Structure formats: structure tokens, C-alpha cells
Amino acid sequence: MPNDQTMMPQFPEPIWRESVEIPSFSNLIEDIDVDIAIVGGGITGITTAYLLTKEGFKVAIIEAGNLLNGTTGHTTAKVTAQHGLIYDEFIQNIGKENARLYYEANSEAIQFIKNTIQEHGIDCDFSEEDAYIYTNSVEYVSKLLKEEEAYKELGIDGEIVDQIPLDFQVISALVMRNQAQFHPLKYLKPLINYIQNAGGLIFENTTATDVDYGDQPVVITREGMRVTCKYVCACSHFPFYDGLGFYPTRMYPERSYLIAVKSKKDFPGGMYISAEQPTRSLRYMMYNNEKMLLVGGENHKTGQGIPTIMHYEALEEFASNQFGIDEYLYRWSAQDLTTLDKIPYIGRITSNHNQVLVATGFRKWGMTNSTLSALLLRDIIVEKENRFEELFSPSRFNSDPGVSEFISTNLDVAKHLIEGKLEYPLRDVNDLSNDEGSVVNVNGKRAGAYKDQDGKLYVVDTTCTHLGCEIEWNSGDRTWDCPCHGSRFSIKGDVVEGPAETPLKRIDID
């Protein structure tokens, strides 16, 4: 029988916030004027604010929730340019030179993080590690060989190996040398302090909803406050402002899952990810002076697929079989966006809006992509040439595979929009057990209901406030998730994750 220490934690909570006290900030209650308004308080927004503060600009960070509580606070925190089997694909689709630029941009981001740690003497558990893509599928051996050939063409330090430091069998693996990992919140807290000390403004619980684009852009908040500035940097995971860039049609959201356990077997170091699905991602972290194992994976499109608690159970089973579990500490999930060509959108939000900049679509490789985003946004604002600008430009459109991905992504959205509208739920709210959520029938209409552990009922309208798709219950995280564009809502209907900005309508049932 499992003991309490080896049982799955009841509620999802990331391990990163446990050991770091992040300062809190008030919400914006008056109109302000700054040089740069930065929407989003994750690693992209904070690094951008830090860089622009160093350039002498007055900045304001506007965060809808709390700093570092979104994607950054739910990461695996691998600091690497090894982003899965991607470089052979890039060479085929965008050419060798652009593939090399992608690698070099991410490598420069790693070096920037190292330099920043040294400059400020930051203790953030930074360690250089080799990164491995491994496989136990014969089908993927040839794909690893092609990726190794791409490494050689691009000058990447890595090669095929038939053994890895982990104590389990693999058929083949591809190593990329001298990558890294760290504790993201320990790294970013000193940057927050730097921004504050240099006069930067930070506001939490302040939702930006629009940009009034006149002589100067003005960010407008949900409460009607106005932030007048010279530039807007949309660093809010999903762009809070679209500017006719049609971003919902050019990206799709995916969720993935993580567990933190104290393993029976010693973890030898290194960072690992499987080539085949379901993904298995591995790294260690230091926690109370002991090595803890982080096991991630189980990717799927948001709001779609099997009950989400089963993804946590699959990771637990893998960790138990391969390493043994002495203590099950934390579990959490993350969400990120993938663009049509798998390259982030970084730069001017559209060709007609030069003063609104965006950084989004990191495809779960946010530690380096966010950092290179901040460096690129800074260079655009200070009008410094940056050789990566064209590669990441949001206005680009690579026809291969862009057209097919555009069609596939939007057909999937249309499918779920129509299916949700046609669904007629049969369950009644009275059918729910304690700590259970489900789509239910309320007075002949589709609704979402959750009954908590004490039997209290929360009922919401299931129509997403973004573009009208029907949300689905996420049993693993106890949220309502939209299968179209990835908006997520709490049991009370509050926005957990955009692009939605407005809460779900609550339904009162006596």
C-alpha cells in the first residue's frame, strides 16, 4: 500500500515558489505615463523590463495576476537550444542559414543568462548539463541520425551515443553538449529588485485589455486606467492585443504535465527528453539540499483528449517504474503556444503597428526563447540592428509548412466550436460527487458544474468569453479549459489563462 508521502498531492502546485518569496505589488489605480509599457510579468516581461531599465527607460510592468505565476512559474526550467527534433525539420522548411540563426539566437540567450548570473552574483542553482534526446523506438533511430546530420551542418556540438547516464536502456540518443538548467524564480527575483531600484513600476492584478493607437500608444486596463507610452511590449503568453495580426488563427495551445519526486535511485545528472510520444522529460533540481527528480511530458491540445488526471497518473507510473518514488512532493501543469512554423513570433505585432511589440509562441522552450525575445525587443526599441529580427518577425509567412498548418489548426478550432454547440449534456448537477466537475444540463442548457469537497456547488456558463467555443472540465487541475484557443477558467469562472479577458458568467442554482 502506498503511504501518504508517495501518494499524489491532492492539488496542483509548482515546486518553484516553495523556496522563493516573490514580492507582491498593488494594482494600477490611476493613469500613468511611462516610456515602455510591458504587459506580462513572466520571464519575458521581466527580462525585457530589466534590459530597458538598463538603457535608461522608465518602464511599467502590468500583470493580470501575480508575477511569475503563469507559464514561467510552471516550467521545467531547462536552459537549452535542444528543442526536440527540430533542426533537420528547420533545414528542410526554412533553410540552413535560418536554422543556424535559430540555434545561435538560443545559444546567445543561454550565454546572456550565464552573464547576468555572474554580473549580479545570483544564486539560482544554475548548472551546466548535457541535454539528450533518447529513443526506444526503432522508427526514431533514423530521425535521430538525420538530426545528428543537421547538428553537423549547423556546427552544433553533439553526436549520437548508444548509452546515456541514466540507468535504463535506450536504443539510441543524441546529445547536445554544454546546455544548462536553473531555478527560474531565484534567477528572476534579483532582476525584479533591479527594476524596482531603478525606478521601474510594477502592477499586479491589473488586466490590460486594449491599446488605443493614436499619436502614442495607450494601454487600457479592464478598470479603465490608461498607460500612455512610447512602446508597448505584449509579453503576456497569448498577446492581449491582436492589432489585426490574427494570432488566434496562427497558433495553437498545448498543455503538458510535471511531477516532482524524491526518487529511490540516484539521478546522475543531465537533461533528457524522449523523441517519441508520449513525451518523457527528465531533469533534477536541488530541494532542501537533496536532489529531486522532475518528470514531465504527456502533451496534448488544451481542452482535448483523455481526463487530465490520467496524464499525472502516467507520469507517476513512469517515475515509479524507472526510478522508484520515496516521496511525491508536487505536481503541476503548464501551457504554451506553438506557431505555424514552430518559430516564435517576436517583434512588431503587425507591419502597421510599429510601436506595439509582441513575443509569443515559445513551444514549451520558454527559458531561452523568452530571453532572446527580450534582447530582440530591446534592440528594436533602441533601433539597434539585430540579425535575428527577420527570422522571428510576426509578419513572416513561410508557405511550407505554414499553409497546411494554418488549415489544420483552424479546422480543429471549427470542429470543436461546432461539436460544443451541438452537444446536449445528460448529467444533472445532483449527479456530482464531492470534488467532481462535469458539463451538466441546467434548465435544458449546457453548463459547467463543480462540487467541492464540502459539497458546495459552483456552476458557470460554458461558453468561452474569448470567441465563443464551449469549455471542457480539466479534472487534473480543477479548471475549465477551452479547446479552441486555450483560455482557462477557475471553478468560479475567473480567468486563469488568456486569451480570454472576461470571466465566465456564473449561474445561480438554488
Image (cartoon, rainbow, N blue to C red):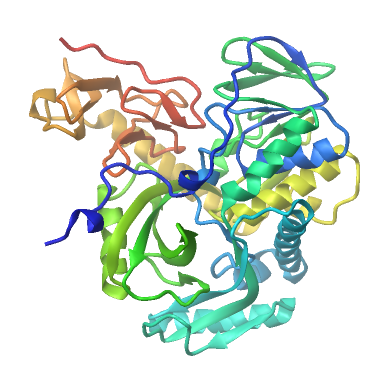
Q: Is residue 454 above or below residue 117?
A: above
- List the single residue furthest toward the bottom: 162
Q: From the viewer's perspective, is 164 left or right of 313?
A: right
- In percent of width and height, residue 135 lies at 43, 79
Q: Is residue 349 visible?
A: no
Task: Work out which residue is located at the far front of the displayed protein and give it.
Answer: 289
Left or right of 133, for residue 229: right
The residue positioned 56% from the left and 86% from the top of the image is: 160
Q: Nearer the viewer, residue 88 or 130?
A: 130
Numbered circles on residues, count: 0
Instruction: Please indicate, yes or no, whether residue 303 appears anywhere in the rendered image.
Output: yes
Q: Residue at x 29, y 44 (%)?
A: 476
Please state which of residues 490 and 240 is positioned toward the viewer in this rendering: 490
The residue most toward the left is: 431
Task: Answer with the quarter of the image where residue 207 lies.
Answer: top right
Q: Is residue 398 above or below residue 159?
A: above
Quadrant location, the C terminus: top left
Residue 356 falls in which quadrant of the image?
A: top right
Residue 436 position by quadrant: top left
The answer to whether residue 385 is left or right of residue 220 is: right
Q: Nearer the viewer, residue 218 or 5?
A: 5
In the drawing, does residue 277 fall left or right of residue 141? left
Q: Residue at x 20, y 53 (%)?
A: 4
Quadrant containing the N terminus is bottom left
Looking at this view, is 219 or 185 the one in front? Answer: 185
- Residue 25 vertical placement versus 81 (above, below): above
Q: Residue 428 appears at what percent x and percent y?
A: 11, 25
Q: Is residue 2 above or below residue 149?
A: above
Residue 230 location (% of width, % of height): 83, 25
